Image: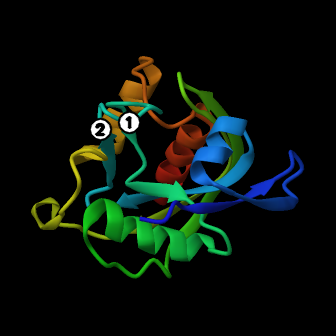
Amino acid sequence: MKEEMLDIYDEAGQRIGVKTYAEVHRDGNWHRVVGLFIINSRHEILMQRRSRKKSISPGLLTVSVGGHLRTGEDEYACMKREMHEEMGIELDVGPARLLYACRDSKTSQDKTDNVFLAGYTLHGDIDLSALHYDKDEVEEFLYIPCTELKRMFDEGVALGVNRQVMTALFEYMKDSQ
């Protein structure tokens, strides 16, 4: 399988080249990542628990789907691809709304992840029993009521999502009630 190629950026967000996924994380290059929060009709947020085998945020709750934008890929194409890869479903992401745009950096034993994050919300009811996913990537998907997720956040429960992103989500949920 051919390794993913990612566009790389300087700290100001200007594209400066292309590297493999491994090179980007080895060298700590800035690159783009997109995340999507799926919210059902009961105002629950579909969260993904990352596999404990992942080097970044193992076993932690994170966005419904998310991933690295490949070279030349736009955010909507990335969300659609990641939804297929991580959930095994096809869903129209056209109605997704931009929730946040920020920068984040994480370091693990073998990776430096410097990212420009863009996050979206999408409203829809997804049957969890219809999802097909790779247990090496995702441990589980679960719906969590916004109030419960906010309680976890306020109590300092470790999440695979940064504070700025979670704050934007809670503000959005408060405004959309």
Is 20 displayed left or right of 135 in the figure? right
Residue 30 in sight:
yes
Which sits in the foreground, 31 or 156?
31
Query: In x, y percent, where is residue 18?
Result: 74, 61
**Compared with residue 163, is residue 118 higher up or lower down, i.e. above or below?**
below
Query: In x, y percent, where is residue 22?
Result: 58, 46
Query: In x, y percent, where is residue 148?
Result: 31, 34
**Compared with residue 158, is residue 97 higher up or lower down, i.e. above or below?**
below
- Between the residue at mark 1 and the residue at mark 2, the CA separation in whole angstroms equals 6 Å
Query: In the picture, residue 123 is in which quadrant?
Result: bottom left
**Compared with residue 87, is residue 141 higher up or lower down, i.e. above or below?**
above
Q: Which residue is mark 1?
A: 54
Query: In the picture, residue 145 is in which quadrant?
Result: top left
Which sits in the foreground, 92 or 147?
92
* Label ID, residue 121: none
**Compared with residue 141, is residue 97 higher up or lower down, i.e. above or below?**
below
Q: Residues within 10 Å of mark 2 (few under 14, many from 20)?
A: many
Query: In the picture, residue 163 is in which quadrant?
Result: top right
Q: Which residue is mark 2?
A: 51
Which sits in the foreground, 101 or 150?
101
- Count of marks overlaid on the render: 2
Query: In x, y percent, where is residue 82?
Result: 42, 65
Q: Residue furthest top?
A: 155
Please name the amino acid that badge 1 sits on. Answer: Lys
Task: Assign a secondary structure to mark 2.
Answer: loop
**Residue shown at the point (72%, 38%) measured from the top left:** 27
**Residue shown at the point (50%, 43%) measured from the top left:** 170
Please name the amino acid that badge 2 sits on. Answer: Ser
Which sits in the foreground, 145 or 92?
92
**CB under 8 Å between discs 1 and 2:** yes
Task: Assign a secondary structure to mark 1.
Answer: loop
